[in-house]
Image (cartoon, rainbow, N blue to C red):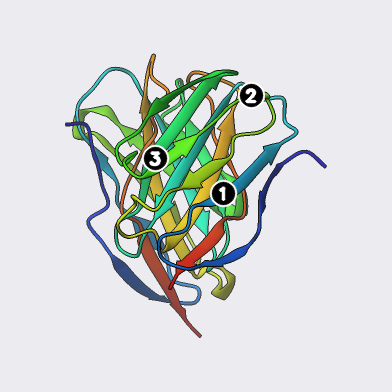
Amino acid sequence: AQSVTQPDIHITVSEGASLELRCNYSYGATPYLFWYVQSPGQGLQLLLKYFSGDTLVQGIKGFEAEFKRSQSSFNLRKPSVHWSDAAEYFCAVVFSGTYKYIFGTGTRLKVLA
Amino acid sequence: DGGITQSPKYLFRKEGQNVTLSCEQNLNHDAMYWYRQDPGQGLRLIYYSQIVNDFQKGDIAEGYSVSREKKESFPLTVTSAQKNPTAFYLCASNQGLNTEAFFGQGTRLTVV
């Protein structure tokens, strides 16, 4: 079955440190990839998306992600984390020609002052 | 402002009662979705609709029902057949195939 794996359930970083959140997806047709962020009790906000073209994509709030087809990965990065980045992050994939989004189980980010 | 509105934000019901969660969008999107979110399980798809008067079951449709009589509305009914209905429910929409989904703010349902 198609799936998305976020291997890190919790990550803690110090403010100002760099961040990388991992995401791997199972093999399928052309993937369309997304990262969303969720604050407690809120909906999901789109950080960035990859459809085609340059495999390094820039998003909002200083985030970027790199698509690596050979590794079936779409890792999210930020050079310097701010306390306001504390939230839960979800990776999602939808394969070409389908409506079904597949979400990872999320990574909860804690930022230390 | 365009967006997706879910109501109510919090909902309490007694066990055995049906309850309907509202989802309205003014983005003119064709597709709409309902997800259930439980801690540590990510988002699981309940139902989705690609077009008015048509919808498909997702991964966990048992105990839920939906309708899509209008493009902008996609209500979800949690029936008494749903064994564990207490959860956070998220509605989403998108323009169609291979486009990003936009989410509402969610409804937290508690069944006592």
Amino acid tagged 2: Glu
Q: Which mark is residue B46?
A: 3
Amino acid tagged 3: Ile
Lower position in the chain sequence, tag 1 or tag 2: 1
Q: Quadrant of residue B12?
A: bottom right
Respond whether the residues carrying marks 1 and 2 are from the same subunit: yes
Residue A57 visible somewhere in the drawing = no
Q: What is the secondary structure assignment of the residue under circle 2?
A: loop
> Pointer 2: what residue?
B69
Who is closer to the viewer here, A112 or B76?
Answer: B76
Q: CA distance from mark 3 to mark 2?
A: 18 Å
Most extreme residue toward the front is: B16
Who is closer to the viewer here, B19 or B9?
Answer: B19
Would you say B69 lies left or right of B3 here? left
At 52% from the left and 63% from the top, the residue drawn is: B108
Q: What is the secondary structure assignment of the residue under circle 3?
A: strand
Would you say B40 lies left or right of B30 here? left
